[in-house]
Image (cartoon, helix red, strand yellow):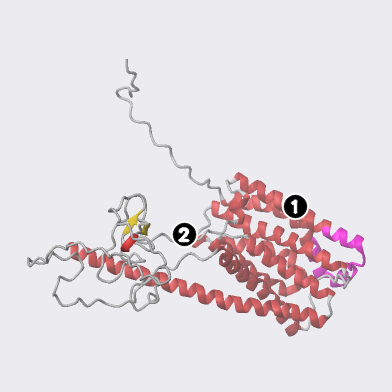
Amino acid sequence: MEIEDRIPEGVGAPAAAATRQPQRIGLPRALGEILAVYVPSFGLGVFTALVLLANPSLGNNDEITGWLPALEEILQYVMQASVTIFGVAFFCSQRGVTLPMLFGKLKRPPEQAPPAGGWYGGYGYSPYGYPGQVPQPLPEGGPQQPPTGQWGAWGQWTQQGQAGPPQQPSAPQQAPQWGEPEQTAPIPAPAPTAPLSAGPPAPAAPGVPAWGAPPQQHPVPTAYGFGGGDPAPFAGVPQPPQERSRGWQFTRAYFVSMAGVLGFLISVIIYSNVTNQTTGAPDQGSSPWLVLVGLFVALAAGFGEEMLITGLVTNALEKAGMTGNRAWVIYLVAICLRIPFHLYYGWASLGVIIFTMVNIWVYRRWRLLWPIILAHATYDFFEYLGSVVPTAAGGLLILALAFGTLVMVVVIVSVENSDRVARRRYARFTEEQALVQNAAAA
């Protein structure tokens, strides 16, 4: 007896599982979550910046002269970064954003698919084939391997696994004795061949000119195909640019973010030279302990500031619908959060607008937070390192960082513009091909 599962009459088929839509929140709630992390993390920093803005001389009492002040400075920044990391992780998890999603992931470039006919099979190395020839489909089990075998006696070829025609044993070759005539092996007579047929020639294969017909003229590849290489792409056939490597993805985001940080430094230098005023940044001396302090403080500041002001602000406000034409809210909120704890720079603190906007753009463009964090940490560490070495050497360090960043930004802009032009050309080519096919079908 067969048992069948039947749906009762009058009951429709089960509905397909509904796709889970991203959870939306209101703008006030998003701002509340951001402030819930910002106040305990940077509230003390904002208060300190206001005090230094009112009385810059207080920053001279913050010198690091030994291991104990250095340890206090390190623990202060590590605790601040820890509060920020846990707060950001908590509220991101409430919105369905995990830390790997927050930091982003480098895209793996797609592997190049084998062209039609195989890499070395069919009628060519590329999906276009050689001119005037049609690629043939691969046989089952992949491309066929060339037959293997061995040469038998008298030029007879025997494949492995196949029994060839009977071979005639060759006469043994022996060295003649002294004074005897030389022995020669008998040569077998060749087998008779079939007489030539005077009938009509066999029909030519597709794409091959018939016997006696004039040779066909084909266009010659003019791109990269000579010398045994891939003949495609032919001239006039655009190709879409491939996804860049992971190293290029990281380098691109890192140096664009670094350019924004250096833009803030340039604004501070211009402000100091124009107004003949120094900023209220605390002077921590030139102790060798500043190298260790700078390493920990740079990493803590990079993680703390960028996870909150770049990562959490962007994700929380995007969940609140601040995308598209309303994305300016993300930039405005991030700027308003970063300026307060840089107020000891005076009016030069407005320079943080530059690298805040650059960091938000980089994160929303490529969704990578690691390069932004490391760019921020690199600048802070170079700044600490410049206070330890002599003034001239510290200036050369910052100048070398700025020059290297400028060169890389020029390279990045050139490569990205080349890829953009290639995509547009390929899109235009595919549209034209579609129009031609539609016209031919009509």
The reply to whether residue 183 is visible in this rendering is yes
Q: Which residue is mark 1?
A: 82
Question: 233 or 228, which is in the foreground?
Answer: 228
The amino acid on which the numbered mark 2 sits, given as a three-letter code, is Glu
Q: Is residue 71 left or right of residue 107?
A: right
Image: magenta residue range? 47-74
- Which residue is outermost to the front? 179
Question: 191 or 106, which is in the foreground?
Answer: 191
Q: Nearer the viewer, mark 2 or mark 1?
A: 2
- Which residue is outermost to the top? 1
Secondary structure category for the residue under label 1 = helix
- Which residue is outermost to the left? 199
Which x, y percent locates residue 152?
Answer: 35, 59
The quadrant in which residue 335 appears is: bottom right
Q: Could you tell me how far apart the alpha carbons at marks 2 and 1 are, in whole angstroms?
A: 40 Å
Q: Residue at the spot x=51%, y=74% of the render? A: 415
The quadrant in which residue 338 appears is: bottom right
Which x, y percent locates residue 79?
Answer: 79, 53
The quadrant in which residue 233 appears is: bottom left
Labels 2 and 1 touching (C-beta < 8 A)? no
Q: Which residue is mark 2?
A: 111
Q: Main secondary structure of the magenta part?
A: helix
The amino acid on which the numbered mark 1 sits, given as a three-letter code, is Ser
Q: Is residue 222 left or right of residue 257?
A: left
In magenta segment, residue 231:
no
In magenta segment, residue 52:
yes
